[in-house]
Amino acid sequence: MGWFEYALAIIVFFASHSIPLRPNVKPRIVALTGKRGFSIGYSCVSLAALVWLIIAAGRAPYVQLWPWAPWQNWVSVAAIFVACLLISLAIGRANPFSFGGGQKTFDVSRPGLVQWMRHPLLVALAIWAFSHVLPNGNLAHVFLFGLFGSFAILGQRAVDRRKKREMGVEWQKLRAQVQNNQALFGGFRADEATVRILAGLSVFLIFFGLHQVVLGVNPLP
């Protein structure tokens, strides 16, 4: 199907991420499935669309933009390790500015990564995407990963607008408190930081090991 399948996969991917979140759509779905059901369903649909998009990119005609070199893979591997650490340090912690939510349970004295970035998960996505551009110098994959990276960056602004609308003046007040906080290492406890860093390392090793099995591409040069 070539470029047609690729274009269709892109449309479905972005539609599956944007339509369910629209103000006139999400409440109806939540009313039918509950918040937990919506989160699970949204995650499954998003993942399925992502897998199809990656497969479609591999089937698209190969148009080389620049030659591959071994060092490009090493840059990508190092960047993915950083992304895994960001995810492990951010996931499961209250973040009223982004996907974590939990405004009532958010501890301003221990903001974690929120002390430096409002959207650590989207930052991790941007790192993952742009780091994959370098070793994949063909038109379909450059467009694919460039699109993901741009989506992650622009998505931060979109989430900011939505959160400001939902939280009102509390958003700016809470943001000022976080910015003025001087907690060392974001207020992470030593035991929590250790567990999360080890978890990030484990996720990295799992991704690294499954990369060739699942995607058929060896991440090493």
Image: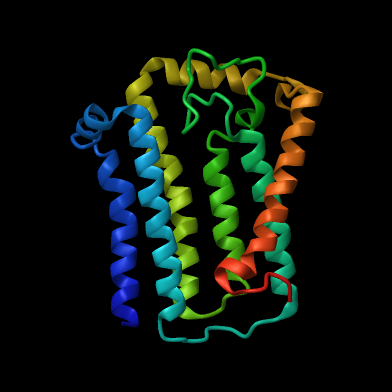
Q: Relative to 13, does residue 61 appear above or below in the rendering?
A: below
Name the quadrant containing residue 112: top right
| Image-based side of 48 in relation to 202, left or right | left
Q: Which percent across, then down, holds residue 20?
A: 27, 42
Residue closest to the eye, 186 or 94: 94
In the image, 198: left or right of 9?
A: right
Q: Residue at x 59, y 57 (%)?
A: 128
Residue 192 versus residue 161: which sits nearer the camera?
192
Above or below 158: residue 35: above
Residue at the (64%, 49%) spot, across then down: 83
* Quadrant that contains the C terminus: bottom right
Residue 53: x %, y % from top left: 40, 66
Give me the residue at 34% from left, 23% from top.
166
Residue 47 in percent (x, y) is at 43, 53
Q: Which residue is painted at 67% across and 35% down in the image? A: 89
Vertical placement of residue 173 versus 27, above or below:
above
Q: Position of residue 180 (x, y in %)?
A: 64, 19
- Of 103 and 218, the residue lying toward us: 218
Residue 185 vs 87, above or below: the answer is above
Q: Quadrant of the N terminus?
A: bottom left
